[in-house]
Image (cartoon, rainbow, N blue to C red):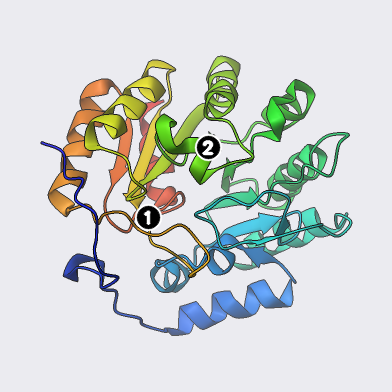
Amino acid sequence: MDTTQKVKQRSRPDWLKIKLKTTGKFLDTQRLIKHNKLNTVCEEAKCPNIYECWGRQTATIMILGDICTRACGFCSVKTGKPTISDKAEPKRAAQTVKSMNLRHVVITSVDRDDLKEDYGSSIWAQTIEEIRKITPECTIEVLTPDFRNYNPALERVFRANPNIFSHNIECVRRISKKVRPQSDWDRSLTVLESSVKWGLSTKTGMMVGLGETDSEVLDAMKESADLGISIFNVGQYLQPTIKNLPVQRYVHPDTFEMFKEKGLEMGFAVVESGPLVRSSYHADEQAKKISNIN
């Protein structure tokens, strides 16, 4: 049975109410990130898990600036004309990873369609290489844009050999053009398929609450599983600002549990499914599970 009733008011159900707790470790993480002049998707995307993750001294570092060339309806990251890419950014990112004593790091970025020669993939590869150079024991997960499916850009990142390659489909196929007008659902699948064929542990994820049905979610999961993707994340969409797309429904935790059960039956090695799940939520634990499986 589909749970697709539209939300008629903005008030969130009890299971989405978060207790904010600022700890010493949270403040330490905040200081390190500011000291190294880095951006994080935790802040830019207004992630609801920032207090938990930073309190555990984990963060998702965002490279290539904080201005995106696309304008997805769900995202609160600034859009516009980016500044010139910072060549020193890979070294600063690596130093932050070392300072935080991380055993697993997630790197992401804005879309840089303005960098026509490689869409920013050289900075991606250099960041992976710099982290490996000074913190070889740290596993690296990359959550990348689609690089417009430009093979030389993708292969540059693949050759840097991240432990996990991640790219999100973000939503179901039917509403993709409304949610991501400058992206393409099939292009995202092609990027993910290329990663699988390269031999990388591959991950994707999506939000619910944007107007999809439960059956469409399961169809998207099945299409992803059939490509050989190892990890699938699904979480509740929460409208970050009044300018973003409105929430169409709040999905009950029981439905998220159903998504997880069905996903594991489809063949995913790991399924993270819950109201507050985001792309990088518990990424360190997922990496351990995949490492043990492989």
- Label 1 residue SS: loop
Instruction: Locate the N terminus and report the quarter of the image it occupies.
Output: top left
Q: Percent x, y for residue 211?
A: 33, 45
For this orientation, the residue located farthest to the left is 1
The quadrant holding residue 13 is bottom left
Measured along the vertical axis of the image, is residue 21 above or below residue 181?
Answer: below
For this orientation, the residue located farthest to the front is 8
> In the displayed structure, does residue 197 sit left or right of residue 265?
right
Tell me if I can see residue 207 in this picture.
yes
Indicate which disc residue 53 carries. none
Instruction: Locate the C terminus and report the quarter of the image it occupies.
Output: top left
Which residue does the image show at 65% across and 31% down from the upper left? 161
The quadrant holding residue 255 is top left
The residues bearing labels 2 and 1 have C-alpha atoms spaced at a distance of 16 Å
Q: Nearer the viewer, residue 230 or 133?
A: 230
Sequence-wise first label, 2 or 1: 2
Amino acid marked by disc 2: Lys
Q: Percent x, y for residue 23?
A: 42, 83
Which residue does the image show at 76% across and 54% down from the upper left? 64
Q: What is the tally of numbered marks visible in this picture?
A: 2
Q: Percent x, y for residue 77?
A: 62, 61
> In the displayed structure, does residue 262 sit left or right of residue 96?
left
> In the displayed structure, does residue 79 sit left or right of residue 172?
right
Q: Residues within 10 Å of mark 2 (few under 14, many from 20)?
A: some
Q: Percent x, y for residue 91?
A: 79, 57
Q: Residues within 10 Å of mark 1 (few under 14, many from 20)?
A: many
Which residue does the image show at 38% across and 16% down from the upper left? 226
Measured along the vertical axis of the image, is residue 130 above or below residue 198?
Answer: below
Mark 2 lies on residue? 177
Mark 1 lies on residue? 237
